[in-house]
Amino acid sequence: MKRQDDVIAAIATPVGEGGIAVIRVSGKGALGVVDSRFRGNVRLAEARTQTAHVGRIVDDTGGVLDEVVALVFRSPHSYTGEDVVEVSCHGGVWVTRRILESVIAAGARPAEPGEFTKRAFLNGRIDLSQAEAVADLIRARADRAHRTSLEQLGGKLSKQVNGIRDELVEVCGLLELELDFVEENIEFTDKAVLASKLASVIGTLDGLVRSYHYGKVCREGVKVVLSGKPNVGKSSLLNALLNENRAIVTEVPGTTRDVIEEDLNIEGVLFRVVDTAGLRETADIVEQEGVKRSENQILNSDILLLMFDLSESVGETERRLMERILNRIDRKQTSCLVVQNKMDLVSNGTPDPMLGFIDGYPRVKISALKGTGLESLRKELVNLALGGDKGLLEEGVTVTNNRHKEALDKARNHLQLALRSLEDGRSGDFIAMDLRSALDFLGEIVGVVTTDDILNAIFSKFCVGK
Ligand SMILES: Nc1nc2c(ncn2[C@@H]2O[C@H](COP(=O)(O)OP(=O)(O)OP(=O)(O)O)[C@@H](O)[C@H]2O)c(=O)[nH]1
Ligand SMILES: [Mg+2]
């Protein structure tokens, strides 16, 4: 078992060559450990907090490894809450490695993934949901993900959850007080007031659980799969959206065989756009494998673009193809958008060949070749990704983490049971039991209630040095 008060050390910057790299050292005695390998005008062990010192780091034979700047943070004024030294050295892979080794030889041990942040949590610097936000912030690849993780890091979710916990503690207290006076038949609390309190908390939890859909969109992005018959222009559309020649486009049906995935940022939402092989019966075994992969992608899509060629009529083949797809996808997960391509080939006034064909889905007409209609397509994608809740959710707290959502869900279920018991006139201790369970689940989010399993699951996902 690794001890909690060891001095730990790790390279905090990514592996590779760069301007500078940072080696982070934390724990009681961290200043002394680094000081024993530091040669400068100031003894780090005696330095004031939040000061920077130029010097050299040496190895165990006294040989100079690099010129560095050492930043000193004294407990509790540091990321972890412990004594911390951050050594900024020149950003070479080898030199960084050697400095870490030197610090370890001087008495530190290599940090585990996420151990700095874990210590920040254990020392009360941040709560659990804030610690998780650190990992999300590092992973954020688009504006909205960045914004929600930053809000969570600032404690927006914690604040709301703690507010709810306070209310529930109060209700619990009232119920339990009443129990002490059960013999005397005294009622302290108006049942109707309690019920409306509970109902309002349930409403708040409902909103938080619902925000998870938007939160997931922010965090993981939206998977958009381009599907349709060969040659309708799927690869052309991918290229047009990315504004680069990413996928091969030819007039030969069956050009794309592999699955091609690229990130696309629209209005701060991250879309993962997937181009696939055109769907058709084929004798070519390479293409057959491609079609199989397309079908896999379709089943795992958040948004499915059903692409058609406007210059062609739709008939029995298309009808069968669409039936097959639409019967297999999970409507709760996947939204469909019909894209009619090659509008440059049809003159105005030509009747829509798809009149009455798979109605009930939003449609856009585009020309991937000329780049027309792409603006409406982008708008439609954002609409489908964020749903109607867009404005509403941006105001409030967004739940981005599955662990939080599950805990909120469970808390809400217990509160619903409590409310029902209250309405049925059950005894106070019975109701309080469910309230306690709800409190525990809410406590798991911020980390007041926690287990080693929960902590390990969370921090093992961090990188070393964070
Ligand atoms: N006129 C016109 N031609 C287009 C348009 N979009 C694509 N094409 C042409 O249609 C042909 C097929 O385009 P692709 O993008 O390769 O079609 P695909 O759906 O990826 O085809 P597969 O990979 O074979 O499934 C190419 O010759 C494109 O130049 C369009 O909007 N207008
Ligand atoms: Mg293609």
Image (cartoon, helix red, strand yellow):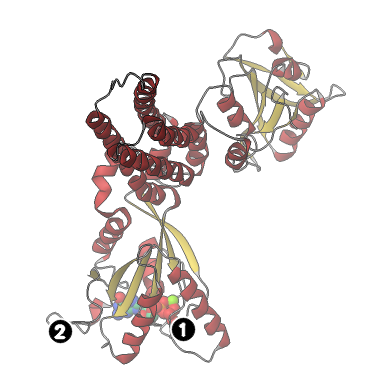
Q: Name the residue under label 2.
A: 351
- Under mark 2, the amino acid is Pro
Q: In this view, does 126 lie above or below 266?
A: above
Q: In which quarter of the image is ligand 2?
A: bottom left
Mark 1 in CB contact with mark 2 (< 8 angstroms): no
Residue at image coords 15%, 84%: 351
Q: What's the mark number on residue 254?
A: 1
Residue 307 lies, in percent from the top left, at 33, 75
Q: Which residue is nearer to you in this view: 244 or 465?
A: 465
Respond yes or no on whether mark 1 lies under 8 Å from ligand 1: yes
Residue 379 in sight: yes
Q: Is mark 1 on a helix, strand or loop?
A: loop
Quadrant (top left/top right/bottom left/bottom right) for the N terminus? top right
Residue at image coords 35%, 90%: 317
Residue 383 lies, in percent from the top left, at 27, 57
- Determine the residue located farthest toward the left in the rendered image: 349
